[in-house]
Image: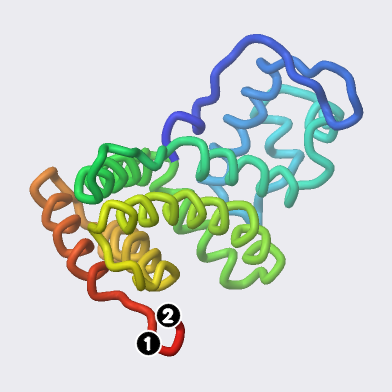
């Protein structure tokens, strides 16, 4: 989560029912949503508190999202899939260094550092939220990352029988564990070491012979 936590202003876009919506109002609602989420967590988050913080009407919120859950899904998905590109530097190592660096920077954003643990904690108690996050955040992010690994296979940097599903767990899970669970700070040398270790793990992550 990086720049989308502070969305841009100006212009207008079309709402769910057709009318043009003022982007400045949308920006105010988005900012209020993330600030409230960071302050009280998803369970205590309410449309009333968002409306009060954003200084907008409830109608302005419901013209954009029919419920708190829909608002959560849309905003988290936009942030998660729109702020960290899957680079194509021409090499797997270059791609991973760029990806890890951008993802780490996003996770260290002051709001993101408070929001991500709260969301994951709530998803552990709320099956519907967990399903929404898998559909709107995890699936698109894994699809993006899979493209990076497939390019590496085409360049013969990874074996043709690389287990992509397990490789994605290695690629994404290690960084998240070190930042969110161990709360480590990663400088450039640390990211480079993480990259080298990840490449070694990916190269060894192969499908069973019966699956090839």
Work out which quarter of the rendered image holds the N terminus and state it: top left
* Alpha carbon distance from label 2 to label 1: 5 Å
Is 154 drawn above or below residue 204 in the view shown?
A: above
Q: Position of residue 71 (x, y in %)?
A: 71, 43
| Circle 2/circle 1 CB separation < 8 Å | yes
Q: Position of residue 204 (x, y in %)?
A: 24, 75
Helix, strand or loop under label 1:
helix
Is 171 drawn above or below residue 9 in the view shown?
A: below
Q: Position of residue 17 (x, y in %)?
A: 91, 29
- Residue drawn 21% across and 43% down? 94
Residue bearing mark 2: 212
Q: Residue furthest right?
A: 17
Is 126 on the left or on the right of 37, as rendered? Answer: right
Q: Nearer the viewer, residue 67 or 57?
A: 67
- Residue drawn 42% across and 52% down? 145
- Mark 1 Cα shell of 10 Å, populated few (<14), some (14-19), many (≥20): few
Q: Nearer the viewer, residue 203 or 191?
A: 203
Q: Nearer the viewer, residue 13 or 40?
A: 13
- Residue drawn 52% across and 43% down? 81
Q: Position of residue 170 (x, y in %)?
A: 32, 68
Helix, strand or loop under label 2:
loop
Q: Residue furthest top?
A: 10
Residue bearing mark 1: 209
Q: What is the quadrant of residue 27 in the picture?
A: top right
């Amino acid at each position: 989560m990086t720049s989308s936590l502070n969305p841009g202003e100006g212009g207008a876009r079309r709402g769910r029912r057709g009318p043009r919506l003022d982007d400045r109002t949308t920006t105010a609602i988005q900012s209020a949503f993330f600030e409230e989420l960071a302050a009280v967590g998803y369970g205590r988050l309410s449309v009333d508190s968002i409306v009060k913080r954003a200084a907008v009407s409830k109608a302005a919120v419901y013209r954009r999202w029919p419920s708190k859950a829909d608002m959560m899904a849309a905003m988290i998905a936009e942030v998660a899939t729109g702020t960290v590109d899957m680079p194509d530097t021409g090499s797997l190592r270059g791609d991973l260094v760029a990806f890890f660096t951008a993802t780490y920077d996003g996770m260290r954003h002051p709001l993101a550092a408070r929001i991500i643990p709260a969301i994951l904690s709530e998803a552990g108690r709320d099956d519907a939220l967990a399903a929404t996050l898998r559909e709107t955040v995890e699936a698109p992010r894994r699809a993006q990352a899979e493209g990076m690994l497939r390019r590496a296979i085409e360049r013969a940097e990874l074996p043709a029988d690389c287990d992509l599903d397990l490789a994605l767990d290695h690629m994404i899970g290690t960084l998240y564990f070190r930042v969110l669970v161990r709360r480590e700070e990663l400088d450039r040398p640390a990211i480079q070491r993480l990259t080298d270790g990840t490449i070694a793990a990916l190269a060894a992550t192969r499908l069973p012979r019966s699956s090839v």
